[in-house]
Image (cartoon, rainbow, N blue to C red):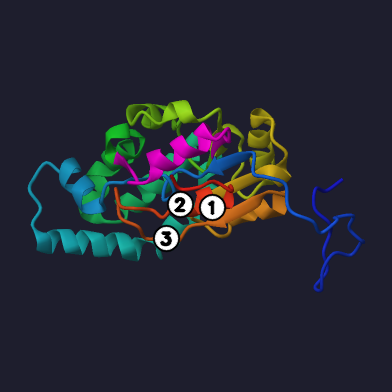
Amino acid sequence: MSLIPVCGPEGPIRATTSSGGPRAAVRAVLFDFSGTLFQIRTYADRIRAALPQPVDDTAMDLMLSGLEAGLSDPGVREAQRARDVSSRAHRHAFTTWYASVPELAPVAETLYEQLKAPEHWVPYADAESTLRQLTGSGVALGVVSDVGWDLRPTFAHHRLDHYFSSWVHSYEHNTEKPDPSLFHHACHELGAAPATTLMVGDNPAKDGGAAGAGLRSYVLPAGVAPGAYRGLEAVLRLAGLSQS
């Protein structure tokens, strides 16, 4: 049976048994990776690190514009389909996009390897303090990410891995968020009911889709720079914790 009632346009089709009282306390929090706890270094920095020759600002602007235009290229868009269901599909999706810019085609594989390199990722300024307060209050933590490689080395590199007891990588399950099986797998590993679990991410369709699996969800605004303050204190409030 579904964890949530089947709804028509106006609401649940069958009567629910909820008492309407206070919701159960949050016992577990699941976090997305990129754009939620970490952000990769800027494309300009990565391109300069990948190319053998110096790149001036004018040339860099042209390459960045090429990446933007590439997102609308039919071949690139097709490569993004189900990109997170396997390591192979993930690599193909990103290298196809990078290679849509002629100057970057020779280093497309190098740019992809940067994604997997822990040193290219930067935790947000309030990530560690948020994780520390949650675990210090007895809240279990997990990672649920649409990704093509194991994230644990990146978290370990930044000394954040010890906060987590569950790691759910989409490529290991041959599916992507918002497939309920990913969220439910993390809940099972943490020993937490979906109704007492909060999913935190930055993608309304994927991370917000956890609500369809019976979890609570919180979607952060997009576009925050690497290493900046992310606004994760909202997670502490949703978990009923003070911000000490």
Q: Which quadrant does the C terminus fall into?
A: top left
Asked whether the beta carbons under mark 1 and mark 2 sit within 8 Å of each other, the answer is yes
Tell me the number on the disc at residue 233: 2
Task: Answer left or right for 53 relative to 231.
Answer: left
Which element type, helix, strand or loop, lies under badge 1? helix
Which element type, helix, strand or loop, lies under badge 3? loop
Please say if 173 is above or below 209.
above
Marker count (numbered): 3
Going by the numbered disc 1, the residue's amino acid type is: Arg
Question: Which badge, 3 or 2, is on the more N-terminal residue?
Answer: 3
Judging by the rendered image, the residue that carries numbered circle 1 is: 237
Give the number of the mark in front: 3 or 2.
2
Going by the numbered disc 2, the residue's amino acid type is: Glu
Residue 143 image offset from top left, x and y in percent = 53, 37
Task: Answer left or right for 109 relative to 131.
Answer: left
Q: Residue at x 60, y 56 (%)?
A: 208
Give the CA distance from mark 3 to mark 1: 20 Å
Pick the residue in front: 106 or 148: 148
Give the CA distance from mark 1 to mark 2: 7 Å
Please say if 5 is above or below 236.
below
Asked whether the beta carbons under mark 3 and mark 1 sit within 8 Å of each other, the answer is no
Magenta-tinted stretch: 121-143
Judging by the rendered image, the residue that carries numbered circle 3 is: 222
Q: Which quadrant does the N terminus fall into?
A: top right
For residue 206, say whether it is visible: no
Toward the right, the furthest residue is: 15
